[in-house]
């Protein structure tokens, strides 16, 4: 694997609507943004509406240096939006039921890019329609056999049905989820240990469980590595921190990093994002070095 892996991020690009402001977001867009910030060859495959929100989203990503060639424009459906409230330091989401990213087209160019990708990042939210689910099925078939297929479960009810989750897991070699999602998954599939269930029953090779300010647990069939996490600065809102973790995880899985190096880098980078408002804060050279695993943090 190269030090600048090709990471394809497939799914939602939307606006996070806070009570007092709007911030660009969406799991797939956040992952692509942070992977690009860390030096990966990141490509976002998504869809916006033919509206001002869509044009502003594309302009903002392009200004940040992200390749927006494969952000499609829908002639009918609006750009996606999510209303966010912060409760006890954690975000809660109210997601629009109709959005342009529900109809991402699988173009010949995207299939060509997938054939050369080292990592595909995807979630469950953008599979809430049969059209997108079928497109993702085809996209996975186009990937190289040794590629990393990283699923950020992002269980958002009522969209993450048992069928949607099963379909996502069938494509995944690695999964990232938080403690709440692990609890939902355990109840959904009657699994006492969701991580080991995904590994033994679903063929997943690595499960990354994030625990907010308490760090993370990375689990494989024969190893388990816990990291205590890093304290975020006050004033942030934690929105996008999980996606930042996913971006670093994708980078280090492509590089073949150890669980210890991956955990340290992902937690440090996610704590930086959690220290700011919004999902896409700028990063310094020091934060970039931490995300790449070049920091001496414990």
Image (cartoon, grey):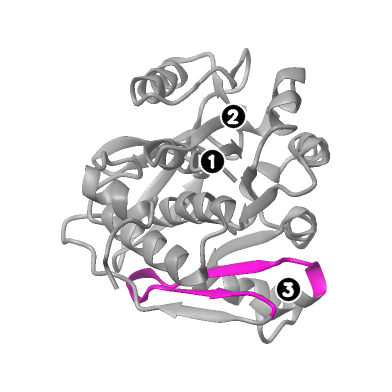
160 inside magenta stretch: no
Q: Confirm whether residue 286 shows in the render.
A: yes
What SS does tag 3 mark?
Answer: helix
- Residue stretch rendered in magenta on the structure: 201-221
What x and y, as percent, mark residue 192?
68, 87
Q: Residue furthest left?
A: 234
**Nearer to us: label 2 or label 3:** 3
Residue position marked by numbered label 3 in the rendering: 199
**Nearer to us: label 1 or label 3:** 3
Residue at (74, 81) in percent of width and height: 190
What SS does tag 1 mark?
Answer: helix
Given contact means CB atoms under 8 Å apart, are the residues at marks 2 and 3 in contact?
A: no
What x and y, as percent, mark residue 7?
57, 39
- Tell me: 197 left or right of 260: right
Estimate how packed mark 3 is, as few (under 14), some (14 to 19) or many (20 or more) residues with alpha carbons within 10 Å: some
Residue 207 or residue 124, whichever sits in front: 207
Residue position marked by numbered label 2 in the rendering: 46
Residue at (71, 59) in percent of width and height: 173
Estimate how packed mark 1 is, as few (under 14), some (14 to 19) or many (20 or more) residues with alpha carbons within 10 Å: many
Residue at (61, 69) in percent of width and height: 207
Given contact means CB atoms under 8 Å apart, are the residues at marks 2 and 1 in contact?
A: yes
Based on the displayed image, in which of its 4 quarters is residue 47 positioned? top right
Residue position marked by numbered label 1 in the rendering: 28
């Amino acid at each position: 694997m190269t030090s600048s892996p090709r990471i394809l991020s497939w799914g939602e690009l939307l606006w996070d609507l806070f009570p007092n402001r709007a911030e660009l977001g969406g799991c797939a867009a956040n992952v692509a943004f942070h992977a690009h910030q860390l030096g990966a060859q990141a490509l976002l495959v998504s869809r916006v509406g033919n509206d001002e929100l869509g044009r502003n989203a594309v302009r903002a990503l392009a200004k940040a240096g992200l390749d927006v060639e494969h952000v499609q424009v829908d002639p009918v459906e609006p750009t996606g939006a999510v209303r966010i409230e912060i409760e006890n330091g954690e975000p809660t989401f109210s997601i629009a039921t109709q959005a342009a990213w529900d109809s991402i087209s699988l173009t010949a160019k995207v299939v060509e890019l997938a054939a050369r990708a080292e990592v595909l990042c995807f979630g469950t939210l953008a599979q809430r329609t049969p059209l997108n689910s079928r497109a993702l099925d085809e996209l996975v078939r186009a990937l190289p056999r040794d590629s990393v297929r990283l699923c950020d479960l992002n269980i958002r009810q009522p969209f993450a049905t048992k069928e949607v989750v099963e379909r996502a897991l069938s494509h995944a070699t690695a999964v990232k989820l938080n403690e709440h999602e692990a609890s939902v998954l355990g109840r959904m599939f009657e699994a006492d240990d969701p991580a080991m269930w995904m590994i033994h029953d679903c063929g997943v090779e690595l499960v990354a469980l994030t625990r907010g300010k308490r760090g993370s647990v990375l689990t494989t069939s024969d190893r388990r590595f816990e990291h205590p996490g890093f304290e975020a600065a006050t004033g942030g809102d934690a929105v996008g921190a999980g996606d930042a973790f996913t971006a670093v995880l994708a980078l280090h899985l492509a590089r073949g990093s150890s669980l210890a190096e991956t955990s340290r880098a992902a937690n440090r980078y996610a704590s930086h994002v959690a220290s700011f408002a919004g999902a896409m804060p700028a990063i310094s050279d020091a934060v970039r070095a931490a995300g790449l695993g070049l920091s001496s943090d414990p």
